[in-house]
């Protein structure tokens, strides 16, 4: 069976609702979620829930071949209020919260650290749940903690424009690193949990755990099985611009659940990890902790160059540059697990530079246009680089002989530019230098005035 050139699926979560629930059941039985986490159960799929989930669209399109390798784009960016794949997990997390609230009568406050996109998507999902009448503004709230350097990537919405919603759903900025932001969110959540439950009846759910994301991202595998069937005898890899690779772990879980069905084929795919020079930790772990090769300054171009290791950029503006603050996780705990998975199933990794992304930008723009994905003509307008990174990295990996597959499915996990959104205004951001500052914000968000 030859996959169709372009296939669009609206409301993927609703279509695969029962399968996602099975994935949640699997996560509950084999995962690590601690006490106090809402049960891994979705609410009944009625018309209001279906409408709430309606932005979970998926699409794919063939992009032709590159040096003999067939390329397919999997478009995970179809929610116009987020333009990233974080929509899928956010909708499932909030759906679980809805069921928990309905069954227990408890009020919930989600607390999450984020480089920006997760914050935008979870905030959008919370607002959608309130607007759909699934919960009230008092029953479900969210507090997000983001690094100051990426605060400009958090999208403005009525969650900030409405004074009552803004107070209940704060966005907090911290001047430290991504690791510091995560530690701050976890410490404040743990410190405040008992007091907020006692004083305001608001229960905190710290959502960062991988198991809160894997089940939702199984939709990628379910869509692949239905719309991108793998011809017999062909080897397929999946490429993804990653920070901690949550999305690929979800895809992997979906492939395992599908393979367990009666009469199913078991063709485990390989995975190609794409990272940037600031945080190449997952690629380095895959290659047994390989250090970045020494770069030298080219006397004419002024670029930093190297030709010793094809996994790393041949040329860069700066050997420690950051293409996008979305990719902020250093030494992710998921790295050893993903490395083991790739060694078992196949795959590789590559690190790309901003110089390489800019050099390939026109080519990337033309390629993704075949999938009805539009990039701005001027790359300076781009605010989310995930799509450009994964396409650039895949093209380079093929050219450098790092891909040993007949075809690669490129996961388009995020892309938006300055015209797609309005950043949160400065007065909607709450600074927090330490845990006590964040605790004060959480108390106010829960309606507790005296801390």
Image (cartoon, grey):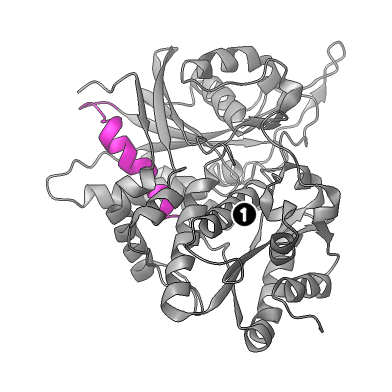
* Residue at (56% x, 36% y) in the render: 80
Residue 284 in sight from this viewpoint: yes
Q: How many neighbours does mark 1 have within 10 angstroms: few (below 14), some (14-19), or many (20 or more)?
A: many
Specify whether 86 is left or right of 29.
right
Image location (x, y in percent) of residue 114: 67, 54
* Numbered label tally: 1
Q: In this rendered view, identify the residue nearer to me: 392 or 188.
A: 188
**Residue 268 lies in what quarter of the image?**
top left
Image location (x, y in percent) of residue 441: 78, 70
Q: Is residue 136 magenta?
A: no
Image location (x, y in percent) of residue 354: 72, 26
Image location (x, y in percent) of residue 132: 49, 56
Q: What is the secondary structure assignment of the residue under circle 1?
A: helix
Q: Quadrant of the N terminus?
A: top left
* Residue at (87% x, 14% y) in the render: 299
Q: Quadrant of the C terminus?
A: bottom right
**Residue 448 lies in what quarter of the image?**
bottom right
Q: In this rendered view, identify the residue nearer to me: 29 or 445.
A: 445
Q: In this rendered view, identify the residue nearer to me: 451 or 325.
A: 451
**Residue 179 lies in what quarter of the image?**
bottom right
* Up/down of 154 relative to 317, above or below: below
Specify whether 279 is left or right of 262.
right
Q: Is residue 224 magenta?
A: yes
The residue under label 1 is: 123
Specify whether 43 is left or right of 396.
left
Q: Which region is colored magenta?
A: 214-234
Residue 360 in sight from this viewpoint: no
* Residue at (64% x, 49% y) in the render: 120
């Amino acid at each position: 069976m030859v996959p169709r050139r372009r296939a669009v699926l609206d409301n993927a979560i609703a279509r695969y609702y029962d399968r996602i629930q099975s994935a949640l059941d699997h996560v509950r039985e084999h995962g690590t979620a601690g006490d106090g986490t809402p049960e891994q159960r979705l609410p009944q799929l009625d018309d209001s829930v279906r409408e709430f989930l309606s932005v979970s669209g998926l699409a794919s399109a063939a992009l032709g071949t590159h040096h003999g390798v067939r390329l397919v784009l999997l478009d995970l960016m179809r929610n116009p209020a987020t333009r990233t794949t974080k929509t899928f997990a956010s909708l499932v997390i909030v759906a679980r919260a809805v069921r928990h609230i309905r069954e227990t009568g408890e009020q919930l406050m989600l607390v999450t650290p984020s480089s920006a996109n997760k914050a935008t998507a979870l905030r959008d999902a919370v607002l959608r749940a309130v607007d759909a009448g699934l919960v009230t503004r008092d029953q479900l709230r969210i507090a997000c903690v983001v690094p100051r350097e990426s605060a400009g990537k958090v999208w403005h919405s009525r969650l900030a424009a409405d004074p009552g919603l803004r107070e209940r759903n704060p966005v907090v900025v911290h001047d430290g690193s991504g690791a510091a932001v995560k530690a701050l969110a976890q410490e404040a959540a743990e410190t405040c949990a008992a007091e907020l439950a006692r004083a305001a009846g608001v229960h905190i759910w710290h959502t960062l755990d991988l198991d809160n994301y894997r089940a939702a991202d199984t939709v990628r595998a379910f869509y692949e099985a239905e719309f991108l069937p793998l011809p017999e005898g062909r080897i397929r890899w999946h490429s993804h611009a990653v920070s901690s690779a949550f999305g690929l772990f979800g895809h992997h879980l979906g492939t395992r659940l599908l393979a367990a069905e009666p009469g199913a084929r078991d063709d485990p795919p390989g995975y190609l990890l794409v990272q940037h020079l600031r945080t190449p930790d997952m690629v380095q772990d895959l290659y047994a902790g390989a250090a970045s090769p020494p770069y030298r300054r080219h006397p004419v171009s002024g670029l930093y160059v190297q030709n010793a290791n094809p996994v790393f950029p041949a040329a860069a503006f700066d050997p420690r540059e950051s293409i996008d603050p979305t990719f902020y996780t250093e030494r992710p705990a998921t790295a050893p697990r993903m490395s083991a998975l790739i060694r078992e199933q196949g795959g590789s990794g590559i690190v790309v530079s901003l110089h390489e992304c800019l050099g390939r930008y026109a080519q990337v723009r033309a390629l993704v246009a075949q999938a009805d994905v539009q990039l701005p003509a001027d790359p300076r307008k781009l605010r989310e680089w995930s799509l450009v990174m994964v396409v650039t990295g895949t093209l380079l990996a093929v050219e450098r002989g790092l891909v040993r597959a007949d075809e690669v499915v490129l996961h388009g996990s995020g892309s938006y530019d300055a015209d797609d959104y309005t950043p949160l205004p400065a007065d909607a951001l709450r600074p927090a230098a330490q845990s006590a500052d964040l605790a004060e914000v959480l108390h106010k968000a829960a309606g507790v005035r005296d801390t």
